[in-house]
Image: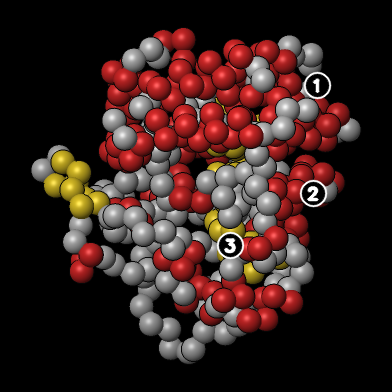
């Protein structure tokens, strides 16, 4: 099976889910105005005054170091823990929630147990093995060390609780992703309802941007009943909450020239602005096919039937980390390449998932990466 087939299977069962966007509100009576930069920590804290859930997309891509640096600054700001209770992350397997709870409250946790949080997720590849994810967990632990127990931050692991001890073949993978309890959008949405909203807490949700759409691009922005759900669409569909959703983009100066002079980073509210009026495909420019479920089958939608959607109907704000040319991506630690047990584990899982191209990329990286 080709790598693209793994993705299609993930879309079919909503394992490798992608984000959703909101309904278009038609033409505005007045022309859009320029967006205005806001200091980003203040913007997020202000959003929590009216929203229990603030969702911040992980970055321009997974591993975005500038966005990671901002998240560290955010959680280290004393106002954050005074306002927010929980942080929901994509980068950890919920099977190890107890391990993470003990770790962030300061208990001694063996490293071999801790690293399973990010190494044993539903994703067979190396995405969460980049050092910034472990660094984030350690930063939360350090913040909690200075806080009274009742104000300590909790990290909620949003990835479904896959047990790789039970995954040996492709059929095992199919069985796991076919189980609706392990949907990579429904699972975290249910987690947020149960652990955050039902307990009247507030949470920052840090996920890949495509999980934070209001309507799903890959399903041609169909409503929830017809398209594939996302975390945001599921939370908002029940009417229990309204999510404040923030999308990260490093190319905003192409829409509004003075963005280049903004502070780095900045946040801007986009409703009624030039940034909000832009089509969503500016923010997600990759040429991906759109699909629909017809008679229970996943079929491609003809290009002339593709819909458009304003960004302001997909998200509430944008985060500008700086010019695209300055963005750096955290890479796999070369030391892991020298760890035979780690390499055997990763290549075995990539083999089970038939992700042959990803396996070759990993081997090529390890052949050239300097081992420190």
- Residue matched to label 1: 106
Q: Are marks 2 and 1 in contact (CB under 8 Å)?
A: no
Where residue 265 sits in the image (x, y, percent)?
Answer: 73, 62
Q: Give the label on residue 134, or none.
A: none
Where residue 18 sits in the image (x, y, percent)?
Answer: 41, 47
SS assignment at label 1: loop
Q: Residues within 10 Å of mark 1 (few under 14, many from 20)?
A: some
Looking at the image, which residue is at 45% across and 60% down? 284
Q: Is residue 195 above or below residue 282?
A: above
Q: Is residue 172 left or right of residue 232?
A: left
How many marks can you see?
Answer: 3
Where residue 99 sits in the image (x, y, percent)?
Answer: 66, 17
Is residue 279 in view? Answer: yes
- Residue matched to label 2: 73
Between disc 2 and disc 1, the foreground one is 2
Mark pair 3, 1: CA separation: 35 Å
**Between 72 and 325, which is closer to the camera in this rendering?**
325
Screen quadrant of the C terminus: top right
Q: Residues within 10 Å of mark 3 (few under 14, many from 20)?
A: many
Looking at the image, which residue is at 34% across and 15% down? 169
Q: Is residue 247 above or below residue 257?
A: above
**Between 139 and 130, which is closer to the camera in this rendering?**
130
**Comes first in the chain, label 3 or label 2:** 2
Mark pair 2, 1: CA separation: 20 Å
Give the quadrant of residue 247.
Answer: bottom right
Looking at the image, which residue is at 45% across and 21% down? 349
Q: Is residue 305 above or below residue 209?
A: below
Between disc 3 and disc 2, the foreground one is 3
Q: Is residue 355 left or right of residue 12?
A: right
- Residue matched to label 3: 249
Looking at the image, which residue is at 72% across and 69% down? 38
**Between 349 and 292, which is closer to the camera in this rendering?**
349
């Amino acid at each position: 099976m080709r790598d693209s087939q793994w993705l299609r299977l993930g879309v079919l069962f909503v394992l490798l889910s992608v984000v959703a966007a909101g309904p278009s509100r038609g033409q505005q009576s007045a022309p859009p105005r320029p967006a205005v930069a806001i200091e980003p920590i203040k913007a997020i804290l202000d959003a929590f005054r009216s929203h229990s859930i603030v969702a911040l997309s992980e970055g321009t891509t997974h591993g975005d170091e500038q966005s990671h640096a901002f998240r560290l600054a955010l959680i280290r700001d004393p106002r954050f823990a005074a306002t927010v209770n929980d942080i929901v992350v994509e980068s950890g397997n919920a099977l190890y929630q107890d391990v993470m709870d003990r770790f962030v409250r300061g208990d001694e946790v063996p490293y071999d147990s801790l690293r399973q949080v990010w190494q044993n997720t539903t994703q067979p590849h190396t995405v969460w093995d980049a050092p910034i994810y472990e660094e984030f967990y350690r930063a939360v632990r350090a913040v909690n060390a200075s806080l009274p127990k009742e104000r300590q931050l909790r990290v909620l692991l949003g990835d479904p609780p896959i047990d790789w001890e039970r995954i040996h073949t492709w059929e095992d993978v199919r069985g796991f992703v076919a189980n609706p309890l392990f949907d990579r959008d429904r699972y975290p949405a249910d987690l947020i309802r149960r652990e955050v909203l039902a307990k009247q807490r507030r949470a920052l949700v840090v996920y890949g941007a495509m999980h934070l759409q209001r309507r799903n691009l890959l399903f041609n922005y169909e409503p929830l009943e017809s398209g594939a759900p996302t975390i945001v669409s599921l939370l908002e569909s029940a009417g229990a909450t309204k999510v404040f959703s923030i999308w990260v983009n490093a190319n905003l100066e192409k829409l509004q020239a003075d963005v280049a002079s903004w502070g780095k980073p900045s946040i801007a509210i986009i409703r009624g602005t030039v940034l909000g009026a832009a089509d969503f495909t500016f923010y997600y420019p990759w040429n991906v096919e759109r699909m629909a479920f017809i008679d229970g089958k996943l079929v491609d939608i003809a290009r002339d039937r593709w819909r458009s959607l304003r960004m302001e109907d997909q998200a509430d704000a944008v985060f500008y980390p700086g010019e695209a040319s300055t963005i750096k991506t955290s890479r796999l630690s070369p030391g892991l390449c020298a760890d035979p047990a780690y390499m055997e584990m990763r290549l075995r899982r990539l083999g089970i998932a038939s992700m042959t191209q990803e396996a070759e990329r990993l081997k090529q990286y390890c052949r050239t990466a300097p081992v420190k």
